[in-house]
Amino acid sequence: MTGSVQADARRGGARILVIEDEPGIVRALKANLSAHGFQVETADAGRAGLKAYKRRRPDLILLDLGLPDMDGKDIVGMVRIEAATPIIILSVRGGEREKVEALDLGADDYLTKPFGVDELLARIRVALRHTASPDSGAEPVFKNGELEIDVAQRIVRVAGSEVHLSPTEYELLRAFASQPDKLITDSMLLRRVWGPEYGDEAHYLHVYVARLRKKIEPDPQAPRYIITEPGVGYRFVTNRG
């Protein structure tokens, strides 16, 4: 029954869209997520998933790459054109190259099947936290040369022009800005932005740093703000504008 969509009537929690064609996985995801208070809608094909996304505007998407009518990576690209909705990939494709490609297209996380419910819930919490409003006590505006971070509005500008960042990219930039001119190790950044269970997954960080540089650096190949400290981590350099 390719192309069908089902919604859970449960109210109160974040809205999660599951785009997955394996019935057993769909049933398990829907049961577990609903039990934890999430509103769940499912689609068993890519085009049906895109229609559900446009209609429901979920808070988060769980996406399989191996769909019957299209590659899940194409869905990542289509969603990213218009929104920063967190996307977690669920796939049997566990190779490093597949993960990097999905992250580079704009996915926020990647879980290789089979995975545990607790691990999935932890990843969902991290992704949703990145879309939450900032703390009211945060510094309202951070300026570094032509780079400006309006914390209250979650807006980033370069040379006066607004730059669109995904929630994860924004949290990474805030992590850098909170430690100006200090050496920050890969592990420190991973744990702060993604959570303690990510301390060893450096490929996540490297992909996101490259994406962030493309958006905020005048010359990403000769970065002004985010400087690599080889073999250790990064340094967010100030007053170089």
Image (cartoon, rainbow, N blue to C red):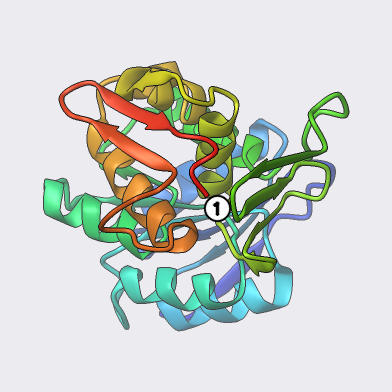
In the rendered image, the vertical position of residue 61 relative to residue 191, given as above or below: below
Res 23 seen here:
no
Asked which secondary structure carries label 1, the reply is loop
Q: Position of residue 182 (x, y in %)?
A: 45, 19
Q: Is residue 116 left or right of residue 171?
A: left
Q: Residue at x 47, y 24 (%)?
A: 181
Count of number-bearing discs: 1
Residue type pointed to by label 1? Pro
Q: Position of residue 199 (x, y in %)?
A: 32, 19
Res 48 seen here:
yes
Q: Is residue 157 left or right of residue 203?
A: right
In the rendered image, the vertical position of residue 164 relative to residue 69, given as above or below: above
Q: Position of residue 205 (x, y in %)?
A: 33, 38
Name the residue nearer the viewer: 125 or 231.
231
Q: Is residue 119 left or right of residue 137?
A: left
Name the residue beneath numbered marker 1.
86
Name the residue nearer the viewer: 179 or 175.
179
Classed neighbour count for the residue bearing mark 1: other residues with Cα under 10 Å, few (<14), some (14–19), many (≥20): many
In the rendered image, the vertical position of residue 201 relative to residue 82, given as above or below: above
Q: Quadrant of the N terminus?
A: bottom left
In the rendered image, the vertical position of residue 50 relative to residue 205, given as above or below: below
Name the residue nearer the viewer: 26 or 202.
202
Q: Is residue 140 left or right of residue 234?
A: right
Q: In which quarter of the view is residue 229 placed?
A: top left
The residue sitting at the front extreme is 240
The residue sitting at the right extreme is 136
Q: Residue at x 53, y 50 (%)?
A: 241
Q: Position of residue 232 (x, y in %)?
A: 23, 21
Q: Residue at x 47, y 78 (%)?
A: 78
Q: Residue at x 52, y 72 (%)?
A: 79
